[in-house]
Image (cartoon, rainbow, N blue to C red):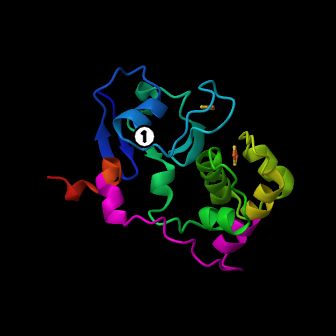
Amino acid sequence: MPRLTVNDRPVEYDMDTATPLLWALRDASNLTGTKYGCGDGDCGACMVLVDGAALRSCLITLEEAEGRFVTTIEGLSRDRSHPVQQALVAEQAIQCGFCTPGIAMAAAALLQRNAAPSKAEIEEAIPNLCRCGVYPRLVKAIQRAGRVERRLERISAAPAPGIDPDDAAEAVPAMSPPDSED
Ligand code: FES
Ligand code: FES
């Protein structure tokens, strides 16, 4: 059975090793922030971090994910405090929000390697499709998140999502730390 680390928690999936990582995350781990859009590598809605790189989880099998460190939007921060999350909200770069988790993961990976990306660098690093067309605001938001990461700017934390992190850990088992398990 494939073993990997999801949001800092070791997980062993009792699933067919050919299962796309996307479905293991959504169906087995209840990490539904990772979205299913096209299932074919085109939209980016399913992006997660795998060993720090933004990858489309619909294209990775559990076998390929074996032994790797996966971070989903639920693991980016527990309280929406990651600079990318703060900036997406502050710049109102979210409309329906379906594409947002995948974009946030791609943006987080970009800022890890380049905290001051140009518009062209953002467009190249974030190929995600957004049917609502948030692209102009997205560039502003990601550049702003980079300034926050470089401590040139602060953004007030977004309002709490209305669920206590401990309650969220119960609702989403894969978010709970290993030592909280029975
Ligand atoms: S669902 Fe994976 S790229 Fe669209
Ligand atoms: S905000 Fe609706 S698809 Fe991007």
Give SS at disc 1.
Answer: loop
What amino acid type should be assigned to the residue bearing mark 1? Arg
Q: Name the residue: 79% across, 46% down.
A: 133
Give the image location of residue 141, x and y in percent.
Answer: 74, 63
**From the viewer's perspective, is 93 left or right of 180?**
right
Q: Residues within 10 Å of mark 1 (few under 14, many from 20)?
A: some
Q: Is residue 132 visible?
A: yes
Q: Quadrant of residue 155?
A: bottom right
Residue bounds of the magenta highlight:
143-170
| Relative depth, front residue between 76 and 68 | 76
Q: Which residue is nearer to you in this view: 135 or 70?
A: 135
On whether residue 156 falls in the magenta region, the answer is yes
Quick check: can you spot residue 176?
no
- Residue annotated with mark 1: 68
View extreme (left): residue? 182
| Left/right of residue 90 with respect to residue 137 in the rendered view | left
Q: Nearer the viewer, residue 38 or 111?
A: 38
> Ligand 1 shows up in which quadrant of the image?
top right
Q: Is residue 176 left or right of residue 46?
A: left
